[in-house]
Amino acid sequence: MITYLLTIYENEKLYEGKPEEEMAQLMGEYDAFTESIKKSGNYVGGEALQPVATATTVRVRDGKRLTTDGPFAETKEQLGGFYLVKAKNLDEAIAIASRIPGAKAGSVEVRPCVDFSQQG
């Protein structure tokens, strides 16, 4: 099994002002998805992130720490959360990613993790 990071990018503004019922339905979809990948044995971990307004970006240049408010890059879609899953191969990881509710309005990046245990 290979470990994949599934990062969910969405436009936060799409959720501003959404009726409470729609947000509850979306959260229910996430709960059902998370439960399904836990039962299938693919789930390793995952979290939802606070809005980008809470982000701080850190850089070290010439030994000095520089911090800026906000995300690394300004884009229409922001990193909203992630799942860490185990999958047999990229096809299975993509199939799992396509079931994430956020994929319907945003995008999900699928990226394999480095397995350092295989290096000598």
Image (cartoon, rainbow, N blue to C red):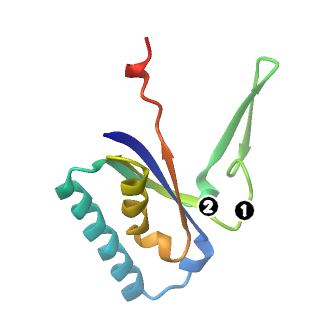
Q: Picture coordinates of residue 43 (x, y %)?
A: 28, 50
Amino acid carrying label 1: it is: Thr
Please tell me which residue is depicted at 67% across the width and 51% down the height of the picture.
71
- For the N terminus, the image quarter is top left
The disc at residue 78 is: 2
Q: Picture coordinates of residue 27 (x, y %)?
A: 35, 73
Amino acid carrying label 2: it is: Gln
Left or right of 112 in this view: 11:
right
On screen, residue 95 above or below 88: below
Instruction: Work out which residue is located at the far top of the displayed protein and give it.
Output: 120
Please tell me which residue is depicted at 36% across the width and 40% down the height of the picture.
2
Number of numbered discs visible in the structure rendering: 2
The disc at residue 75 is: 1
- For the C terminus, the image quarter is top left
Within 10 angstroms of label 2, few (less than 14), some, or many (20 or more) residues? many
**Residue 50 seen in the figure:** no
The disc at residue 12 is: none
Please tell me which residue is depicted at 25% across the width and 70% down the height of the picture.
32
Q: Nearer the viewer, residue 58 or 26?
A: 26
